[in-house]
Image (tube, helix red, strand yellow):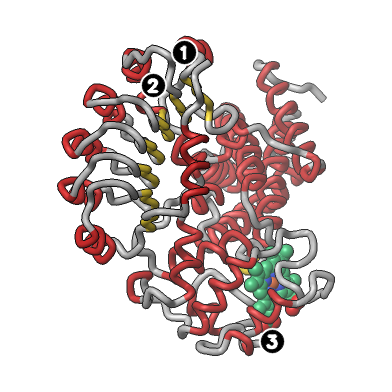
Amino acid sequence: MAYISKNRWVDYVVFGLSVFLIFCLVFESYIELPVLVAWVGRWHPLILHFPIVLLSIAIFLGLTGKNIPRKLLVVATLSALITAISGFFLGKESISKGDLLFWHQWLGGAVALLSAIWYWLSGLQLGNAIYSKIIQLTLVGLIIFTGHYGGMITHGEDFLALPLEKTNEKIPDNPLIYQHIVNRILDKNCVSCHNPNKQKGQLLMTSLAELMKGGEVGNTIIPGDPEASELIQRLHLPMEDEEHMPPEGKKPLDDNEIQILERWIALGASDTMRLNHLENNEPLVALVKGLMEPDPMEKWKDFPKVADSTIRNLSSDYLTINRVANNSDALSVAVFLPPEYNSQYILDLERVALNIVELDLSGLPIGSKEMGMASQCINLQWLEIDCTPITDSEMDTIQSLSKLELLKVYNTEITDKSLPILKKLESLKNLYLWETKISEKGLEELRSLKPNLLIDTGIDGAIREFFAEKDSVSAE
Ligand code: HEC
């Protein structure tokens, strides 16, 4: 039996891809994909249309007794193999490997491999033999079922969305408690087993309506009564209990997350409740805010890069620069009083102004030039300018520091004229303010205007001395 093929290399490619696909399917659990390869998987939903169309045409020609152009069969087979392999990559990326995906994957693999066999048979000039007809009919059935399962996967819970993208989304400033907070916790920890694709305990967690409907046992959520809600009970079971959720081997929820779910249910498990609907003393407020607090490394990650050599060049015996964390470009700068003060060292910091998050200038004879430099450090969170000769006019320059959380200005000449500036610093949480010319009345006003601002107006002498000592190093 002569094997006709003008294109040997095509045969090799078909053979190679077939072997690779079988390898993928069989050794699936041992395979870890590099990111780039996983990206190939994203093309699956697009390229899958080619084999469907091409194979359908070829099968139609075959079953109606027409001649199937060899080129058509080549392209159809290759596209089927590539589609199956890309689909395999995509499947590896998904969080939840449910039954649907399992069947879709094996059926799709079968389509590709059967096409390869068909291609090979037709090369043996058995194109019209009975095997070939059986293969064509089988392919029709397989393509229909593969497509059906594939459709169910994509139309179920956001199968194609990467889990990472979902959990990294920023929580809005005034979040909906269910959608932005509760749902995020469930998404991260529970949905992988409670979705349409893999519905453990008959419970779906992909929408509030499904949660309310409950699962096998029922009573999943009883609005107003967290203790009676099955969902909460299971979170509190001892870890070794079989019914503890999430089951053994998965990372359990932390206390903060559990309390959020509890308070949300206690308040009626509503889906329209927003953070600003809640009273300030409602525990849920602090819990949610805790969750919204951005990871400090996160907010520093877009800082301009600073080379170690730059840090070395700017540093001196009286000026230390440290990275706030290893590998971080956020800098903490402390300046001590040298025997002969020269503002240039401080002005030179302008080069890294955007990187400075902590700046300690306390005890130095600074003036408007140095404060001008400080005002350019727009990422500054912590500023110490206590025990310096600054006045209201220098305070004026720090208005731009919208991220400032801590400010030490004790033992300075500032007066009530600086109060509007202090009021404007929207991120300010801690203010150290004593031995200034600010009046009691002005202070009261500031307090009532900014109830969340912690104002420290004086501590006993011993502690004050300690602060003063720590802030200035005696010149050698
Ligand atoms: C690794 C898979 C997995 C994860 C993750 C998971 N569950 Fe489950 N869950 C199951 C299984 C399996 C069952 C059914 C067996 C049982 O009832 O214990 C179940 C059942 C339940 C039930 C009972 C449903 C009913 O009415 O019968 C609740 C409630 C539940 N899970 C809540 C959660 C919560 C909340 C999370 C996230 C914190 C979670 N699950 C995460 C596998 C999981």
Q: Secondary structure at mark 1?
A: helix
Q: Answer with the quadrant where ligand 1 appears in the image.
A: bottom right
Instruction: Give me the C-alpha separation between circle 2 and circle 3.
Output: 60 Å
Label annotation for residue 373: none
Asked whether the residues under the numbered discs 2 and 1 touch, taking CB atoms below 8 Å apart as contact, a structural biologist would say yes
Residue 448 occupies quadrant: bottom left
Q: Residue at x 77, y 43 (%)?
A: 28
Residue highlighted by disc 3: 217
Residue highlighted by disc 2: 352
Q: Secondary structure at mark 3?
A: loop
Sequence-wise, which precedes: disc 2 or disc 3?
A: 3
Instruction: Give me the C-alpha separation between circle 1 and circle 3.
Output: 63 Å
Could you classify mark 2 by the number of other residues whose Cα lies within 10 Å: few (under 14), some (14-19), or many (20 or more)?
A: many
Instruction: Give me the C-alpha separation between circle 2 and circle 1.
Output: 9 Å
Quadrant in which the N terminus appears: top right
Can the viewer see residue 195? no
45 left or right of 406? Answer: right
Mark 3 residue's CB less than 8 Å from ligand 1: yes
Give x and y (percent) for residue 423: 23, 53
Decide: is 434 above or below 249.
Answer: above
Q: Amino acid at mark 1?
A: Thr
Decide: is 238 above or below 322.
Answer: below
108 left or right of 418? Answer: right
Label annotation for residue 310: 1
Give x and y (percent) for residue 107: 69, 52
